[in-house]
Image (cartoon, rainbow, N blue to C red):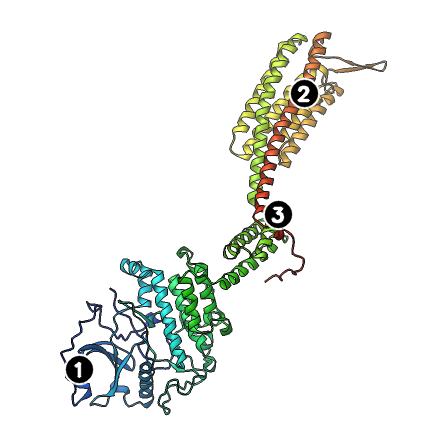
Amino acid sequence: MKPPGPFEPDLFDDSVREPEDDLPRVSLVPPPQAHSIPPPVDPGQGSLGAPDPLARYELRRSLGRGAMGEVHLCKDTRIGRDVAMKAILPLYEGDPQVRARFLREARVQGQLEHPSIVPVYDLGVDAEGSTYFTMKCLRGLTLSQILKGLRKGDPEIVETYSRQKLLRAFSAACLAVDFAHSRGVLHRDLKPSNIMLGDFGEVYILDWGLAKLRKDAPEAALPLDAHADDLKTAAGKILGTFGYMSPEQAMGKVGLLDARSDVYSLGCTLFELLALEPLHARDGWNAMMVATLQGADARPSVRAPERDIPGELEAICVKATALDPAERFASARALHEAIERFLHGDTDNAVRRELSARHAHAAEQAARRAESPGEATAAAAARRESLREVGRALALDPGNEEALRTLARVVTRPPTEVPPEVSAEVKGETLARLRLALRDGVRFDVASLALMIPFGLWMGVQGPAGLLAVVGLTAISSALKLLAAQSDGTRRTYVFGYGAYLFNIAAMSLIGRVFGPLFFLPMLISSFTFAFAMTHSGRFRAAIMGTGCLALVLPLGLELCGILPRSYAFRDGAMLILPPGASLPEIPTLVGLAVSSMFMIVGPTLLMGRVQRALRRAEVRSATQAWHLRQLVPAEARKPATTRPPSPSRP
């Protein structure tokens, strides 16, 4: 086992107690040898009397020394047991104030007869006039030592002291403190190093050197020497240990101290027991004083999320360490009962509802922030926070109406700004549709070549070069479409897609030489432009549209300028087609035009059908998801609240 528990070095000085790890200790227990097991009872040894009372005690070794006192391990020769003897140092024996406070500590501790308060056996003066008192010799570990072992992951400590075991010991300590309060005594220095756990289930509250009688204590609660100045502490003096003393204690408001001040110290101890770190970081007494007066987040799960701390215990910590004493547990017994309810599985429904209301209010505030104008990323984060807080509120109280209304509000109202994740998902879906259109475009190219080559030959194409050029340009366009459809990057998809469109336009411009730029070519260009423009990218659509218009207007302009031969002649109110690329015999021309026109009807229709089916699937998926979310909320909670005004926004 680890060494037994330390005590504060100076049990008589009214100065401020610094953090416990910075000072030497006085211990009432033997050093870390095989002394955890008490010696066997020996009723046959020891005498019944001695001229010198101190001769009854056989000094063995010093257990520790403080600024004004020293503790020794002794053997009571009359009874044959080990005891701890505490004596004033000879240097301060003549100081009446130190002696009075020493006597106060012995009498307070001796009169608080409780299983969890170290019993005082004897109080006297030795032959040299030195005042002493003896008490039970403790064997075990302080809670401070246990928590230190848990922080370090000591296997023996971890195995021996489970959370449930520590909570039961803490609960017993609360009862001991409540007993002291019933006798009119405030401890004023409760902390992990002043709570000891014995090896056989004992729990002790140590160090009553700063104990004080409550101002409202009954006169007969704890009779002491009326002339002693020990229980009358001057107003404005700060006593206790920073990091554990209550705010009113830290401000020196002695007249305001009551049982709730010790409850605050117990709450700090409970926080450390759960989070394995102190509520107020040990950054020096000045910083701890500021933290105590301003308050700290007393939710252990915030400081130690990996420890899976139940919400009920978290709520107990928050209540016990409230800045306002009126908001704390009224007594140490009330704190004990709250711990026992948790240990017995009897969850405090009132605490759960109160905690659920806090989460519901936080969810409503986050929903308001999500709906206010602002950056999309911040709005998305606020919506996520709102849903998380709703989940916590409903986990604690499934019937919380405010949480249910907020849930219905968040899941049924679209955000004013599209969240970045949603934008990315929609962008991916749009890109997928573009890739689908590109693959269909390859099929369209293959089908058009299968029709164009035989009909071109039948219609008497003048020279094979033009037909081969159309076939080559269409093949290049198909290859670029495949590259665009298989590309992982959005930029490459659009670059390859635009290249495919350019080669398609070039091929169609050559086909336009058969009937001219204003006959049949506009229908081809519009079909391809429509297929390529099915994307959310405005710049890509603009480029496609501009290129299509240019492909239609440019050949006409070249003809009007005389650079290309005219495709049309106008005589006597008639428009004549002068095809430079084909002879246009009657039957092949009519059949070719009819088949091509039907192809231009069927092809875009099939493509649009594919796109509409994809859109339909997306809409059904989105509507189904929204429907599922609405089923989580009762029908009455889906209606907006009309009688309750909206809660004011917190800064």
| Badge 3 element | helix
Q: Is residue 256 above or below residue 537?
A: below
Query: Of the residues shown, which amino acid type is indicated by label 3?
Result: Thr
Position in image of residue 643 (x %, y %): 67, 60
Query: Of the residues shown, which amino acid type is indicated by label 1?
Result: Arg
The residue where tag 3 is placed is 412
Residue 78 marker: 1
| Badge 2 element | helix
The residue where tag 2 is placed is 600
Position in image of residue 216 (x %, y %): 45, 84
Position in image of residue 160 (x %, y %): 29, 60
Which residue is drawn at the image coordinates 63% and 24% (left, top)? 606
- Give the quadrant of residue 43: bottom left
Q: Visible in this render: residue 131? A: no
Which residue is drawn at the image coordinates 47% and 66% (left, top)? 318
Q: Nearer the viewer, mark 2 or mark 3?
A: 3
Q: CA distance from mark 2 to mark 1?
A: 117 Å
Which residue is drawn at the image coordinates 36% and 87% (left, top)? 223
